[in-house]
Image (cartoon, grey):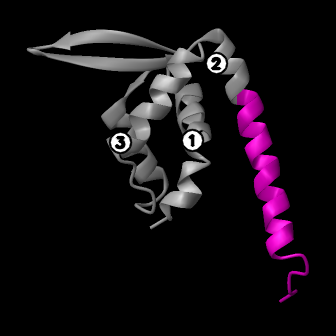
Amino acid sequence: MIANDLLKGTLRTIVLKLLSENPRMYGYEITQKVEELSLGKIKLTFGALYPVLHKLEAEGYVQTESVSIGKRVRIYYRLTPEGNSWATVKIDEFIEFVKVMNYVLNPYPSVS
């Protein structure tokens, strides 16, 4: 299981990546996809996910769509055009960050 303090700084990037690859997703779907892709090592709580989604919406990167399913309303999230561009930038930044951290933590990898 990945520690919450490590996950906290990456959650926005994870959400942006998933939304950039899917036309729209709802909260539970996002949590399940993250758990699937991480082989169960990341289990998002709704208490962590929804503040990120709401902040992305407030910043104009995500828009919502409400769909009635029986007596329930499901909120779908999708990237705006600006969000799509911003997602590409943030994902590239994160990939570079991971490369740098890998070097910082293992500057002299052993050759096997």
Residue that mark 2 sits on: 83
Q: Position of residue 26 (x, y in %)?
A: 36, 27
Residue that mark 3 sits on: 47
The tag earlier along the polypeptide, 3 or 1, is: 1
Which stretch did the figure color magenta?
88-112
Give the structural element (helix, strand or loop) at label 2: helix
Q: Quadrant of residue 42?
A: bottom left
- Is 58 situated left or right of 110 in this image? left
Give the CA separation, mark 2 to mark 3.
22 Å
Residue located farthest toward the right when viewing the structure as drawn: 108
Give the structural element (helix, strand or loop) at label 1: helix
Q: Judge whether 53 appears above or below 10 on screen.
A: above
Q: Main secondary structure of the magenta part?
A: helix
- Number of on-image labels: 3
Residue type (three-letter) at the residue carrying disc 3: Gly
Q: What crowding class fits label 2: few (fewer than 14 Cα within 10 Å), some (14-19), or many (20 or more)?
A: many
Q: Judge whether 110 appears above or below 43 on screen.
A: below
Please state which of the two labelled residues, at mark 3 or mark 1, is closer to the viewer.
3
Q: Position of residue 50 (x, y in %)?
A: 40, 32
- Is 44 situated left or right of 93 in this image? left
Q: Position of residue 39 (x, y in %)?
A: 44, 60
The residue located at (71%, 38%) in the rendering is 91
Give the CA separation, mark 1 to mark 2.
13 Å
Residue that mark 1 sits on: 14
Q: Position of residue 108 (x, y in %)?
A: 91, 81
Residue type (three-letter) at the residue carrying disc 2: Gly
Residue contact between numbered discs 2 and 3, judged by CB atoms under 8 Å? no
Residue type (three-letter) at the residue carrying disc 1: Ile
Q: What crowding class fits label 1: few (fewer than 14 Cα within 10 Å), some (14-19), or many (20 or more)?
A: some
The residue located at (72%, 19%) in the rendering is 85
